[in-house]
Image (tube, helix red, strand yellow):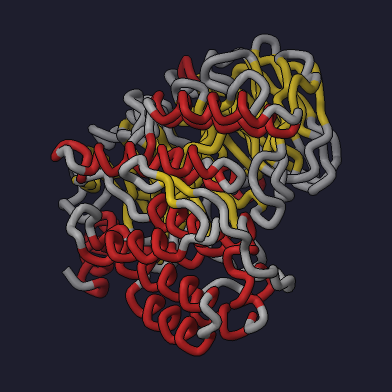
Amino acid sequence: MSARAGLAAVAVAMLLAACAGPSPPATYAAIARDIVAARFDAEAATLATIHNAADGQGLTVWRVSGDDVQSLRSWRLDGGRLGADILLSGDGNRVVVPASGGGLAAVGVASGRRVSVLDMPRPFDREAVAAGAFGPEGMVALAMRPPGAALLLFEVASGRLAAAAPLPGDGGTAGLMFSRDGRHLLRMGAAPAAPAALWTTRPLRRIAAVARHDGAAVFLADRDALALAAPEGTLRLMTLPELTQAARFRSWRAERGWRGPLVSGPDALLGLITAGAPHARDRFRVFHLDRDALLPLLDIDLYADAAHAIGVTRGGEWRLAATSGVLRFASPGAAAVGVERRVAEARRLLAAGLPRAAGETLLAALALDPERLGERGADLMRDHPALAGEVERRRAILLRGEEYTAHADGRPLFIYGYLALLAGHPDIARTAARRLRGDGSIPTQFDGPALAGYLDALVAAWGGRIDEAMAHALAARELANPGVGAFLAERIRAHPRAWGPLLAERRALARATGVPLALIPTSVAPPPQPLPFPRPDGTLAEPR
């Protein structure tokens, strides 16, 4: 279906009143680029979107099942949107939409029939709704803009106004959020410096506040705490109901600030969208909230996509409502958490001057996921060449098993190759490049040929052949997927000595790798000193 035909189909569907039956089937991708807001239900099985159509804005509810996304029902949003929020129930069965006469109605998604009309105080103006939230136990909360700023709490089944309380004149409300048990309601102030205030719902009463400094918030799924993420890349855990700080993390790079929703998933996972400098591509990231650390598990470059909503299923699958459609990512799993815990522990041991203990900690991670350790622990292996060789030896064994080849990734082998080059063994680096290029053990979709070209470029550069090195690098970029540039930026920052001869030609290196010039170091390292370095077969390459 073409984009124009898809939009036409949706426009026809929206002209049908809700009482006329479900909307005709339509794919989410047909109108994805026109979506301005989205929200998943609690199980990420239902998605509600606000989108632009030929006759104004509309609200559509979709059923998400694996790769199949089908529209269930559509409504016009006559008179504008309901503040900045989509009011979809946690089970995905009910949604709040504009009602005739200027009010608001709760409607059943499956039947399209009205459940109740919210008993709004008079006079009521829909445009005065600043934010809203659909909570558990059939509650809906609305925050009204000044003048007359107030917090309203409704029972959906009857439409009755259950409670109301005035709000301070602090610039309005940016968002509302219920806790999972419905006992608490968080109000985010609209001004960047406005506090986040915690309210009880029975009775409706403000009980605590915390400085917010803009950002996102979420009630954690598995503990009585609130997480606050700030644009500069910090995350604070606040206890409930006191809102006192229990922990503060700064786990992702400073150039990647928060941009988008923050979602709490099972097994102490947090998902959010981060971005770099203005106009940089968004990234989807998942962290494990450990006892005293925020461990990175997923880091997905969204390329040209923009994520409107994040959801997570009970089984731990993450779903993103993006401009290209619904993107799905499997749960990272317990092995990834185990590797990250050991990498974090190894960093602490190295900082304490205990390299042997750090090496033993990393070796323990090999049994969990050598592929992940080969990339995540690369910066620690620079001073532990025996560990780098052991990782590659075990990877080579696993790659020979059919059940493992589907997960093969060339990045750890690339890192192993240039670590060997840093130890003064270009022959090992050349062998790694050959394996990346064509021995069949690493699928080409994982950028093996491109990384082989970059490894050839490093070998040529350390041999003094700079022009040849740049030719290899430019050819490699032609083969690379967009995500390779971000990976190379991380590697250049972690091990600038490996790139030393090419750093004298920073602009050319930026063109050949796609790494922004500002991220490329300016120092040029001296040639490496030859050191013993282990081969994947277990033998040791001695210095010549």
Q: Quadrant of the N terminus?
A: bottom left
Residue 322 image offset from top left, x and y in percent: 40, 55
User: What residue lies at 65% left-to-right and 31% top-to-bottom?
Assistant: 355
Q: x, y (%) of residue 293?
A: 65, 27
Residue 230 on image: x %, y %: 72, 43
Quick one: 436 or 25, which is closer to the camera? 436
Residue at (43%, 62%) from the top-left corner?
483
The residue shown at (45%, 28%) is 365
Asked if one can make out residue 326 in the rendered structure from this viewpoint, the answer is: yes
Res 491 → quadrant: bottom right
In the displayed structure image, the side of residue 96 where residue 437 appears, left or right: left
Q: Quadrant of residue 475?
A: bottom left
Q: Nearer the viewer, residue 363 or 155?
A: 363
* Residue 516 vertical position relative to residue 83 in the rendered view, above or below: below
**Could you say where residue 337 lies in the image, as x and y percent from the top left?**
47, 27
Residue extending farthest front: 544
